Amino acid sequence: MKVLFRVDASEKIGTGHVMRCLTLAHVLRRRGHVDISFICREEKGNLCNYLIENGYDVYRLPATEEITWEKDAEQTESVLVKAGWSDWLIVDHYQLDAHWERCICRSSRVGRIMVIDDLANRPHECDVLLDQNYYCNMRERYAGLIPDDCTVLLGPEYALLREEFSVAHRNMRERTGELRRVLLFFGGSDPTGETLKALRAWELFLEAIYRQGEDHKHSFIVDVVVGKVNPLREEVRQACVELTEKYTTDICRIMYHCQVNNMAELLVKADVALGAGGVTTWERCYLGVPSLVVMVADNQVETTQAVAEEGAIRLLGWHEEVSVEKIAEELYDLFRHPEALCAMSQASLRLMGAAREEIAGVNKVTEVLEEVTR
């Protein structure tokens, strides 16, 4: 089975689309489908070289300020001519819809199209549609937007999580509600600078602990994770250095990580995570990690609110409305109420449902692709 992905990453849109496609590509390759390539635009903050480092061919489209679906389809068709016949074209792109997909189908160079979407705000012409998010109205969201015979994969049970998360899930520890280790990660690019805000909030949290005279009882570890396309990564690193110099290691250790490949290991160690909505929501929930979440993009709003209503996360709000002080207050509240951390963890695991089985969501998606191809 030959598979092509059409997906982009940039400082503006982040890296989540490429990373979840890469997860699916890894599983396809592991199951013997070795002819897998990516079509990506060379925007600032792209992951073309990262995909190549992972062993995949990349067809590069030129960077552009603005592009129409017609021009994108024309450029993609040129790639399809070079690439030859593909059994599947997997599209993960908010700017592309049924117009683009019909145009690609008419080229007769792909057998089937799978769309990965989160928005349900435009029609698609596809054979399979995947939306791994949780919504109160999951079954109704795509009514009238996809063909009647489209295979629809909805919900966290189809979450595209890497194999490392299955391993970490098997090794999960029982959570007591104690808050000693914290993970900060706001996506690969963190376009709104939430990591720096969270670090300032952590400093306020420590000051609050001091004021209560409890510093002698507690030692904390903070794992700060940034992507290599994060434009503020040097400022984040410097902030970590300054905090490390301010506090002795018996009070707080700040661990700076850039472009990690062991996120599951870091998450499973964390007592609480601070992060954005989006793809990493399901990574945290799968491992039962309580989290404080800030919404940084419009596409995160609906699903993040739905997850919060289930008690699986504590939603702080839209990033522009979330202050350093607000984050610090929420951290201190969780520190004082271990039962709240335990409740969030249990709600997260319940929400993931069937995805917590040994066959994780990405394997289920792969099986559907194989079955439809037969």
Image (tube, helix red, strand yellow):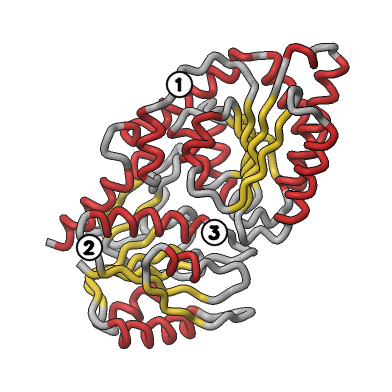
Mark 2 touching mark 1, by CB under 8 A?
no
Q: What secondary structure is found at the residue carrying circle 1?
A: loop
Q: Is residue 317 left or right of residue 76?
A: right
**Pointer 2: what residue?**
33
Pointer 2 or 1: first along the chain: 2
Q: Earlier in the sequence, mark 2 or mark 3?
A: 3
Q: Earlier in the sequence, mark 1 or mark 3?
A: 3
User: Label 3 amino acid?
Assistant: Thr
Rendered position, 254 above or below 120: above
- Residue 297 in picture, x, y percent from top left: 63, 53
Residue drawn at x 54%, y 83% as measured from the top left: 62
Q: In the image, is residue 36 above or below residue 174?
A: below
Q: Position of residue 82 (x, y in %)?
A: 32, 87
Quadrant of the drawing holding the C terminus: bottom left
Q: Residue at x 58, y 20 (%)?
A: 341
Q: Which residue is mark 3?
A: 15
Q: Quadrant of residue 317 in the image?
A: top right
For this view, does 289 lie left or right of residue 203?
left
The answer, for residue 266, to whether it is visible in the render is yes
- Give the structural element (helix, strand or loop) at label 3: loop
Disc 1 marks a residue whose amino acid type is: Arg
Name above or below for residue 332 compared with residue 71. Answer: above
Query: Residue 256 or 14: which is nearer the viewer?
Result: 256
What residue would you read off at disc 1? 173
- Whether the residues at callouts 2 and 3 have beta carbons within 8 Å, the answer is no
